[in-house]
Structures are given as C-alpha cells and as structure tokens.
Image: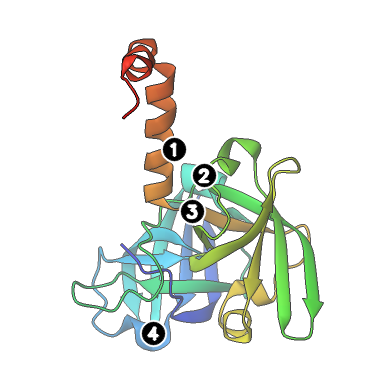
Amino acid sequence: MFTGIVQDLVPVQDIVDQGDLKRLRIDLGALTDNLKLGASVAVNGTCLTVTEVAAGSAWFDVITETLRVTNLGDLKVGDLVDVERSFQVGDEVGGHIVSGHITATAELVERAVAGHDHVLTLALDQQWMKYVFHKGFIALDGASLTVSSLDRASSTFCVSLIPETLSRTTLGTIAVGERVNVEVDAQTLTTVDTVERLFADEQWRAQVMAKPLS
C-alpha cells in the first residue's frame, strides 16, 4: 500500500524487452537503502515487485497485462518516473491510501497556466468517469490529488497543481497527448458499485419503496 506522496522523480536506466515481459532498471538512489527483494515499489503509481537491487538501482519485471493497462509500456531509457516505496504502519499518510493497482490511463488534453494557477485537463474512458467526483480523491502516476472539476459529457476531469507537485512528479513535464496512470479511490469505487448492484436488484428496490417514510 502507498500514500500517494511521490518520494522522488528518477530516470529509467535500462529496459530489457523479453517479448511477454519487460525488465526495468530504475535509479532509486537512497531509496534502495534497506530495500529487499520482493518489496513493493510504486512506479508511476503501479505497484511493482523488486527483483534485484544493486548500486542504487532496482530491477522490476513488468508483465504483458501491466504493460497494456498502464503507461509503463511507453517508457524509454532516460524517461523520468514517479516512485514511492510502500508505507509502514505508523507512517504519516499525507495523501490517501493507494493500492498501486492502476484502473486505466488518462490522456492529457489541455494544460492551462495563469500565474500560479496550473490546471491539467485529462480525458478518461467513460466507463471509469462514474468513479470520479468533484473534490474526490484520484491518483495520477502515483500522486494523490483532488479533482478540481469534471465534465461528464466530455468524459474529462481537471486537477489543479501546486509548484511542488509540478517539480516533483511527472505531471510537471507530460505533454498534451501523453498518458498518465489513473487509480480511482477504492472507497468511491466500492460505494458506487454497491449502490449500482442494489438498484439493479428488483426485490431490494421493492422493499425500500414499501417502507413508510418516517
């Protein structure tokens, strides 16, 4: 599990393409201290397992499904990625609880800057927009953010970023047309899916409608 507070923005040092698997070597620097094989690290918000640690770098194996669902398949050597090590019980949770299980990717369609006001507009597949709410949590490339506005008709939402977020994450440099990894808030997803299942149950609806108003 992660907090959505990106710890560093670091380069991809090597990519080994093995057909149905890609091996990524990432420069984690000091974040490799006490990092053990099998540990979880969020790379652009994607929970990956450490397979090798050496000289400030860590290797990760990325399978086909992960490459398909996330933007990790788009990476090239030298690209910068957001990284966060899994949190320990007792750590401060400055963002929101993030699992590292990516929901989908969203495309950056506009970057609007006016002074310190920096707003990104992203397009998300319509099937996932039902989990996005004004002032709700969302994680983009692993960064915990608040949705500042949304337009369900155009299937877009906006996030407003402070300079610190711009300088410490991929969100400061991605270009229009590029993709970011999206993880919708788990509690929101559970609530929406539960309500949908209940309202699809005719027996449950009949019981609710039969109850007198108090």
Disc 4 and disc 3: Cα gap in Å? 28 Å
Disc 4 and disc 1: Cα gap in Å? 42 Å
Label 4: few (<14), some or many (≥20) within 10 Å?
some
Instruction: Give, as a three-letter code, the residue at label 4.
Output: Gly
Kindly indicate whether the residue at mark 2 contacts the one at mark 1 (C-beta within 8 angstroms). Answer: yes
Instruction: Give, as a three-letter code, the residue at label 2.
Output: Tyr
Q: Which of 146 and 41 is in front in this view?
A: 146
In this figure, which residue is indicated by the disc labeled 3?
183
Q: Nearer the viewer, mark 4 or mark 3?
A: 3
Residue 56's disc number: 4
Considering only order in the chain, which callout, 3 or 4, is on the residue closer to the N terminus? 4
What number of labels is visible? 4
Q: Picture coordinates of residue 111 (x, y %)?
A: 78, 68
In this figure, which residue is indicated by the disc labeled 1?
192
Considering only order in the chain, which callout, 3 or 1, is on the residue closer to the N terminus? 3
Q: Which residue lies furthest to the left in this view?
A: 89
Quarter occupied by the C terminus: top left
Query: Tag 3, which secondary structure?
Result: strand
Considering only order in the chain, which callout, 2 or 1, is on the residue closer to the N terminus? 2
Q: Which of 64 and 169 is in front in this view?
A: 169
Query: Tag 4, which secondary structure?
Result: loop
Disc 1 and disc 2: Cα gap in Å? 7 Å
In this figure, which residue is indicated by the disc labeled 2?
131
